[in-house]
Image (cartoon, rainbow, N blue to C red):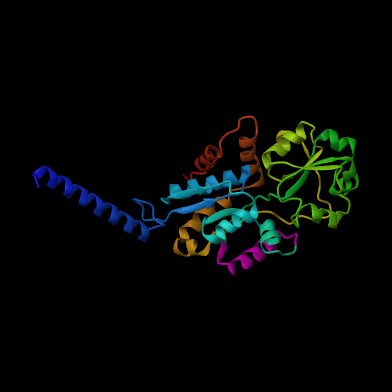
């Protein structure tokens, strides 16, 4: 064998050994990113604006503190996100206390925000999931109408709407027709709520349907920027049907027990998030400017000196 052939064989052998060592190394450090001594954190979210923004805020804050992040945003509804967390497909995602209580733990609604939070924290601890500090903002459900429709039908409260529903068209969003804290619960608590027509819309299209006159009423969230942005009327929940819905990250206990700094970083952020701040950020994404959630998150972290 001449020198050139010997050199070719040697290089090929070295490449094979290199690939084998790399593969073995990868199996020993699946949670570590190359060049980092901190684990990769897999962050998920549900499929609407506020969740995208929260997911990005958490992701960028962790990245600023040296944690590699894998984004798995826009997973879908509550049960999809929660199943991804349980299976380890994600390490954390932002949830809402009222949703966790009623739809994950199947508990009864309660009006006290701290009581709901403690029930959720205790209930999920048994499932090896840690509930971090809740935000100051309460993204509770609201039923929303245009001022024109509210005035025409004398709508101020959910009791008013329950009696007038048969004359109105309603824009549903996924899960709301089946959830205990959705339409079935409203019908049980208030009576009525039998709409003339109820169509299913993607979450991002419901306000367009409302403002265009395609529907008369839709379901919204307390921190939706469109409510103020489009000068809409949020009807009062006069029987206090809905529990508080403060956002709180759900994190696999394995992650926080090994990396307590993750909880410290996210808890600091949650203490800054008020109704006004969250609504303003949501409107930046959904209003005329249509800013990207990543940019909105970056601006928030910069303003608060967290990145």
Picture residue at 61% right of the left edge, 30% below the top = 289
* Residue 121 relative to residue 259: left or right: right
Picture residue at 85% right of the left edge, 43% below the top = 156
Which residue occupies the foreground of this view, 219 or 288? 219
Picture residue at 80% right of the left edge, 35% below the top = 146
* Residue 50 relative to residue 153: left or right: left
Considering only vertical position in the picture, is 230 above or below 297?
above
Which residue occupies the foreground of this view, 18 or 273? 18
Magenta region includes residue 126: yes
Picture residue at 64% right of the left edge, 29% below the top = 288
Res 133 visible: no
* Residue 298 relative to residue 185: left or right: left
Q: x and y percent of residue 8 in the render?
A: 17, 45
Q: In the displayed image of the protein, which residue is found farthest to the front?
A: 1
Q: x and y percent of residue 38 in the render?
A: 40, 55
Res 301 visible: yes
Q: x and y percent of residue 182 in the render?
A: 76, 53
Considering only vertical position in the picture, is 241 above or below 224?
below
Q: x and y percent of residue 267 in the render?
A: 54, 55
Q: In the displayed image of the protein, which residue is found farthest to the bottom?
A: 126
How many dots with numbers? Answer: 0
Considering only vertical position in the picture, is 197 above or below 126?
above
Identify the magenta region. Answer: 109-130
């Amino acid at each position: 064998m001449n020198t050139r052939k010997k050199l070719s064989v040697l290089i090929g052998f070295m490449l094979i050994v290199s690939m084998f060592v790399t593969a073995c190394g990868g199996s020993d450090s699946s949670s570590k990113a190359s060049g980092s001594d901190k684990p990769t954190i897999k962050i998920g979210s549900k499929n609407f604006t506020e969740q995208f923004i929260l997911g990005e805020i958490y992701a960028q804050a962790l990245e600023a503190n040296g944690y590699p992040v894998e984004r798995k945003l826009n997973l879908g509804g509550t049960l999809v996100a929660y199943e991804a967390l349980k299976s380890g497909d994600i390490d954390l995602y932002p949830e809402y206390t009222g949703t966790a209580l009623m739809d994950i733990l199947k508990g009864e609604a309660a009006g006290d925000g701290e009581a709901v939070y403690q029930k959720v924290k205790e209930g999920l601890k048994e499932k090896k999931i840690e509930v971090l500090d809740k935000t100051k903002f309460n993204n509770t459900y609201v039923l929303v109408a245009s001022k024109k429709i509210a005035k025409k039908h004398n709508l101020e409260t959910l009791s008013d709407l329950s009696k007038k529903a048969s004359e109105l068209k309603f824009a549903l969003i996924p899960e709301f027709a089946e959830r205990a804290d959705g339409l079935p619960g409203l019908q049980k608590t208030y009576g009525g709520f039998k709409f003339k027509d109820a169509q299913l819309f993607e979450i991002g299209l419901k306000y367009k349907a409302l403002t265009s006159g395609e529907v008369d009423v839709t379901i919204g969230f307390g921190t939706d920027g469109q409510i103020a942005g489009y000068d809409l009327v949020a009807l009062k929940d006069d029987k206090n049907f809905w529990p508080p819905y403060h956002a709180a990250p759900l994190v696999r206990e394995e992650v926080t027990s090994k990396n307590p700094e993750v909880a410290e970083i996210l808890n600091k952020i949650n203490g800054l998030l008020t109704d006004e701040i969250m609504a303003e950020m949501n409107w930046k994404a959904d209003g005329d400017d249509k800013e990207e959630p990543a940019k909105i998150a970056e601006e928030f972290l910069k303003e608060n000196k967290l990145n």
